[in-house]
Each structure stands twice: as C-alpha cells, then as structure tokens.
Image (cartoon, rainbow, N blue to C red):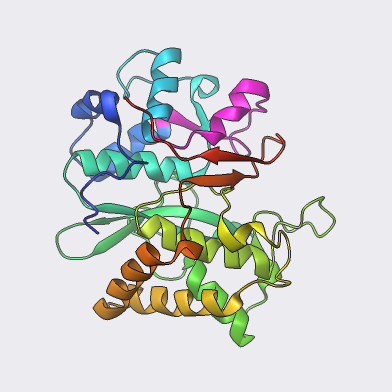
Amino acid sequence: MDYAIHTDYSDPRSYAHLFDALPDDVPGIAAVIRNLLIHYRGGGITFTGDRLAEIDHRWVSSMLATDQKRNGTALAVPREPVDRIVGCCRDYTLLFVSALRHKGIPARSRVGFAVYFKEAFNHDHVVAEYWNGDRWVMIDAQLDPAGQEPFNTEDMPAGPFASAASVWLGYRSGSLDADSYGADPNPDAPLRLHGGWFVRTYVHYQLAHLQGDELLLWDNWGTLCDTPATLDGADVDLTDDIARLLVASDNGDETATKDLAERYASDPRLRPTGRSYITSPTGAPPVWVELVPPAA
C-alpha cells in the first residue's frame, strides 16, 4: 500500500488544517504529538468515566475533535497534562503517522513489544516508521528523546523493539518464553494479559496495521473472539503462515509483501469485516461496534 496516503483511521478529515501549521521536521512533529496526548496508565493521572473512555477513540479525526472541543487552539500550543487526549501508544503513533502523511511523508505503525519499559518483561507497544528517502526509520513518538533510554528513540536500532511476528515465531520454535511478553506480567490478574494467546493476537494486529486498518489494541474479530486468554482451539497454523510472511516482508521480500496484501484482502479471517468486538480497558462490558468512519 501507499503509506503516504491516509487510511480511514489516520484521516484527519475536517481537522486537516490543524496539521498545516506543524513543523516540517520529524522530531518537531513528534514533539507536538506528545503535547496532545497522555497515556491512560503511564501519565501519572488517574482518569475515569468519559475521560477514560477517550482511549476508545478509533479515528484521528475523533481525537482531534476531542482536543479542539477541550482546548480550541493550535496543536503546538502547550496543553496541561490533564487537558490532553487520554490514549495509549497506538494513539501517539497513529496521530504521528497521520501528521507525517499530511506532510506527504510515507509513514506506518508497527505492532510488537518493547524491551525498555520494564526489566525482565517485554511490554506490548506500537511505534512508527517513516521513509526518509533511503530507508524506513523507526521512531517511538511517545517518548521524549531526552529521556533515559540508552538508544536514539528517533532512529531506533534493531533490538529494543521486536515485531509481534518475530516474537511469535520465537515462541513457536521454543526459543522465547511468551509469558514475558504482554501488557501485564501478573499471573493472578482477572485476565491473563501475557503469553502465547496475547502474542498471537498482536501478530494479527501487526498485519492489520500494515494493511491500513490501524485498529485499537482491544479490537477483536474472526478467530480472535473465540479463545480469549488461551490458545485452545486457535488456528495457530494460520498465525504461523502470517508471521513468517511478515518477517520475510520486513527483511525485504517483495513477494511476501504482495502475498500479505492479497491474503488480507481475500481472507475474512484476517481482517474485521465491518465490525469489531471491543474489550476495552475502561471496564465497559464487551460489545460489538460497527467500523464506520466519521463523516467529517
């Protein structure tokens, strides 16, 4: 796909003019995005009710609508943390990708796991990549580059971030412990948010994001709805096939890239077909929602 063109998810729609005033340099754009969002778990503020529900914003235009209703100023004007859009890594990345696409810069989101948030545990994470004219550059737009990470967060090397597909293949070969990958290492939590089932789900998120469906990290469809928190009965062979193609595509295999696009378009098991089953961390009861983009 053409990553310089907006998807339904990244399209700012009637708020596109807000991106016109953004800086032209990538670090400057990332800094503005960090001014707009606060992480619902890691931002130091506890949000509830309608504010917490902002994490279910699916579309960039919805995020920008919330920001403008609350703040009503240019995006670069400083926001107090409490006045920012409540979101997560997926939202930082999607807003950043949207802004780059608005500037004509090819950009995409990458779904996987970060080794740099917690010792001995690899947290689920979404980062961005943009094409600088010669190569894809990986950037964690959520992190201040002046932070404590021992690497350049604006041009990340191989190692700190692992794609979901590569983790799945490592788990399947026995070389990785899937219990060290997820959103929460607590084995006694009401829902076990780590392990093989979690990694499998993220392989399908990785594919969807790369094919232009930059879904929420609690969207479910097809076989992802069948076996929550377990691999019992899951079609792991399908996930194996997709993971191998994703890794090959990442390594420059154009045939694998083409195969992924064709399979995603033709196989309804791999994509949401007009609706999604939401298991939101707001604690709201799971519900089916229609995937209808806003009109404006």
Can residue 152 be seen in this snapshot?
A: no
Nearest the eye: 11 or 290: 290
What stretch of residues is rendered in magenta? 35-59
Residue drawn at (24%, 54%) of the image: 3
**Height in image: 115 above or below 153?**
below
The answer to if 43 sits in the magenta stretch is yes
- Percent position (x, y) of residue 235? 61, 74
**Tally of numbered discs:** 0
Nearest the eye: 222 or 53: 222
In the image: residue 180, left or right of residue 56:
right
In the image: residue 292, left or right of residue 280:
left
**In which quadrant of the rendered view does residue 64 lie?**
top left
Residue drawn at (23%, 30%) of the image: 22
- Percent position (x, y) of residue 108? 32, 54
In the image: residue 251, left or right of residue 110:
left
Residue drawn at (57%, 59%) of the image: 222
**In which quadrant of the rendered view does residue 168 lie?**
bottom right
Picture quarter with the C terminus: top left
Residue drawn at (58%, 34%) of the image: 43
In the image: residue 228, left or right of residue 256:
right
- Percent position (x, y) of residue 242? 46, 74
- Percent position (x, y) of residue 192? 76, 57
The answer to if 131 sits in the magenta stretch is no
Can residue 130 be seen in this snapshot?
A: yes
**Height in image: 44 above or below 135?**
above
Picture quarter with the N terminus: bottom left
